[in-house]
Image (spheres, helix red, strand yellow):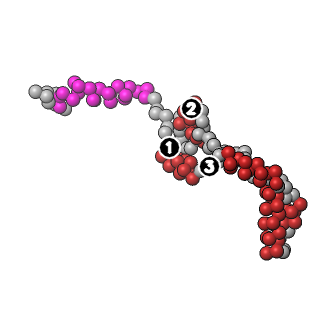
Amino acid sequence: MANKQSKSREAYFARYQQAGKYASNRKAKLERTMRKQPNNTQIPLALKNVASYRRKDPKESYWSHQMIEIAKIYKAFVGVFDKGLFNQKLEDQEAARRVRNPNLFPEPAKDTSGQQKKRISEFSLAARAHDNRGNLVWA
Protein backbone atom coordinates (compact mmCIF):
# COMPACT_ATOMS: atom_id res chain seq x y z
CA MET A 1 0.00 0.00 0.00
CA ALA A 2 1.42 3.39 -0.98
CA ASN A 3 1.84 6.08 1.63
CA LYS A 4 -0.22 9.18 0.98
CA GLN A 5 1.21 12.48 2.12
CA SER A 6 -0.89 15.27 3.50
CA LYS A 7 -1.51 18.38 1.42
CA SER A 8 0.44 20.57 3.84
CA ARG A 9 3.46 18.28 3.58
CA GLU A 10 3.28 18.35 -0.23
CA ALA A 11 3.06 22.17 -0.16
CA TYR A 12 6.02 22.37 2.23
CA PHE A 13 8.15 20.20 -0.05
CA ALA A 14 7.16 22.31 -3.09
CA ARG A 15 8.30 25.48 -1.28
CA TYR A 16 11.50 23.68 -0.19
CA GLN A 17 12.29 22.83 -3.81
CA GLN A 18 11.42 26.24 -5.25
CA ALA A 19 13.42 28.19 -2.66
CA GLY A 20 16.52 26.10 -3.29
CA LYS A 21 16.82 25.20 0.38
CA TYR A 22 18.45 21.87 -0.43
CA ALA A 23 21.42 23.55 -2.12
CA SER A 24 21.83 26.20 0.57
CA ASN A 25 21.61 23.64 3.40
CA ARG A 26 24.12 21.35 1.70
CA LYS A 27 26.50 24.25 1.05
CA ALA A 28 26.33 25.30 4.72
CA LYS A 29 27.06 21.72 5.87
CA LEU A 30 29.99 21.40 3.48
CA GLU A 31 31.47 24.74 4.60
CA ARG A 32 31.10 23.71 8.25
CA THR A 33 32.90 20.45 7.49
CA MET A 34 35.59 22.36 5.59
CA ARG A 35 36.32 24.44 8.70
CA LYS A 36 36.59 21.27 10.83
CA GLN A 37 38.60 19.29 8.24
CA PRO A 38 40.76 21.67 6.22
CA ASN A 39 42.81 18.86 4.66
CA ASN A 40 39.78 17.08 3.17
CA THR A 41 40.19 17.20 -0.62
CA GLN A 42 36.67 15.99 -1.43
CA ILE A 43 34.87 19.03 -0.04
CA PRO A 44 35.99 21.51 -2.76
CA LEU A 45 34.80 19.03 -5.40
CA ALA A 46 31.44 18.71 -3.65
CA LEU A 47 31.08 22.51 -3.38
CA LYS A 48 31.34 22.81 -7.17
CA ASN A 49 28.29 20.57 -7.62
CA VAL A 50 26.04 21.57 -4.71
CA ALA A 51 22.77 21.91 -6.63
CA SER A 52 22.58 18.32 -7.87
CA TYR A 53 20.39 16.02 -5.84
CA ARG A 54 22.50 13.05 -4.73
CA ARG A 55 19.90 10.52 -3.59
CA LYS A 56 18.63 8.18 -6.27
CA ASP A 57 16.46 5.09 -6.36
CA PRO A 58 18.43 1.87 -5.99
CA LYS A 59 19.00 0.09 -9.30
CA GLU A 60 19.83 -3.36 -7.91
CA SER A 61 17.65 -5.53 -5.77
CA TYR A 62 18.30 -5.18 -2.09
CA TRP A 63 18.86 -7.79 0.62
CA SER A 64 17.14 -7.08 3.91
CA HIS A 65 18.37 -8.72 7.09
CA GLN A 66 15.32 -11.01 7.06
CA MET A 67 16.04 -12.12 3.50
CA ILE A 68 19.64 -12.90 4.44
CA GLU A 69 18.53 -15.03 7.40
CA ILE A 70 16.01 -16.93 5.27
CA ALA A 71 18.68 -17.58 2.65
CA LYS A 72 21.11 -18.91 5.28
CA ILE A 73 18.53 -21.25 6.80
CA TYR A 74 17.40 -22.49 3.39
CA LYS A 75 20.98 -23.16 2.33
CA ALA A 76 21.71 -25.00 5.56
CA PHE A 77 18.82 -27.41 4.97
CA VAL A 78 18.74 -27.77 1.20
CA GLY A 79 22.38 -27.05 0.36
CA VAL A 80 21.63 -24.57 -2.44
CA PHE A 81 19.83 -21.23 -2.40
CA ASP A 82 18.32 -19.59 -5.47
CA LYS A 83 17.48 -15.87 -5.40
CA GLY A 84 14.34 -16.67 -7.37
CA LEU A 85 12.64 -17.53 -4.06
CA PHE A 86 12.23 -13.81 -3.44
CA ASN A 87 10.87 -13.14 -6.94
CA GLN A 88 7.39 -11.63 -7.28
CA LYS A 89 6.33 -14.11 -9.98
CA LEU A 90 4.98 -17.36 -8.57
CA GLU A 91 6.36 -19.37 -11.51
CA ASP A 92 9.88 -18.17 -10.73
CA GLN A 93 9.42 -18.99 -7.04
CA GLU A 94 8.29 -22.53 -7.90
CA ALA A 95 11.27 -23.02 -10.21
CA ALA A 96 13.61 -21.85 -7.44
CA ARG A 97 12.03 -24.26 -4.95
CA ARG A 98 12.72 -27.16 -7.30
CA VAL A 99 16.47 -26.46 -7.35
CA ARG A 100 18.25 -29.19 -5.40
CA ASN A 101 21.83 -29.88 -4.50
CA PRO A 102 22.78 -33.11 -6.34
CA ASN A 103 25.25 -34.00 -3.58
CA LEU A 104 22.57 -33.91 -0.89
CA PHE A 105 19.77 -35.42 -2.95
CA PRO A 106 21.22 -37.97 -5.38
CA GLU A 107 18.95 -39.70 -7.83
CA PRO A 108 18.04 -43.20 -6.66
CA ALA A 109 19.89 -45.94 -8.49
CA LYS A 110 17.75 -48.13 -10.72
CA ASP A 111 17.57 -51.73 -9.58
CA THR A 112 17.91 -54.15 -12.48
CA SER A 113 18.58 -57.33 -10.51
CA GLY A 114 15.09 -57.84 -9.12
CA GLN A 115 16.12 -56.96 -5.57
CA GLN A 116 13.36 -54.34 -5.44
CA LYS A 117 10.65 -56.98 -5.93
CA LYS A 118 12.21 -59.17 -3.26
CA ARG A 119 12.26 -56.28 -0.76
CA ILE A 120 8.62 -55.51 -1.48
CA SER A 121 7.63 -59.14 -1.00
CA GLU A 122 9.29 -59.14 2.44
CA PHE A 123 6.75 -56.59 3.60
CA SER A 124 3.70 -58.13 1.97
CA LEU A 125 0.83 -59.43 4.12
CA ALA A 126 1.69 -63.02 3.33
CA ALA A 127 5.29 -62.55 4.44
CA ARG A 128 4.26 -60.85 7.67
CA ALA A 129 1.54 -63.41 8.46
CA HIS A 130 4.07 -66.28 8.70
CA ASP A 131 7.24 -66.59 10.74
CA ASN A 132 10.54 -67.87 9.32
CA ARG A 133 9.43 -71.55 9.82
CA GLY A 134 6.19 -71.00 7.89
CA ASN A 135 3.82 -71.03 10.94
CA LEU A 136 0.96 -68.53 10.99
CA VAL A 137 1.68 -65.66 13.32
CA TRP A 138 -1.83 -64.23 13.22
CA ALA A 139 -4.40 -66.60 14.59
The kind of residue tagged 3 is: Trp
Q: Is residue 90 above or below residue 59?
A: above
- Residue at point 54% right, 41% down? 101
Q: Which residue is mark 1?
A: 78
Q: CA distance from mark 1 to mark 2?
A: 20 Å
* Residue 54 in sight: no
The kind of residue tagged 2 is: Leu
**Disc on the earlier residue, 1 or 3:** 3
Which residue is at the front of the view, 29 or 133? 29
**Disc on the earlier residue, 3 or 2:** 3
Q: Is residue 128 above or below residue 4?
A: above
- Which portion, as a residue range, is magenta? 111-131
Q: CA distance from mark 1 to mark 3?
A: 20 Å
| Element on which disc 1 rests | helix
Q: Which residue is mark 2?
A: 90
Using a 10 Å C-alpha cutoff, classify the residue at mark 1 as few (fewer than 14 neighbours), some (14 to 19) or many (20 or more). Answer: some
Which residue is at the front of the view, 66 or 48? 48
Q: Is residue 32 above or below residue 14?
A: below
| Residue 9 magenta | no
Location of residue 39 by image quarter: bottom right
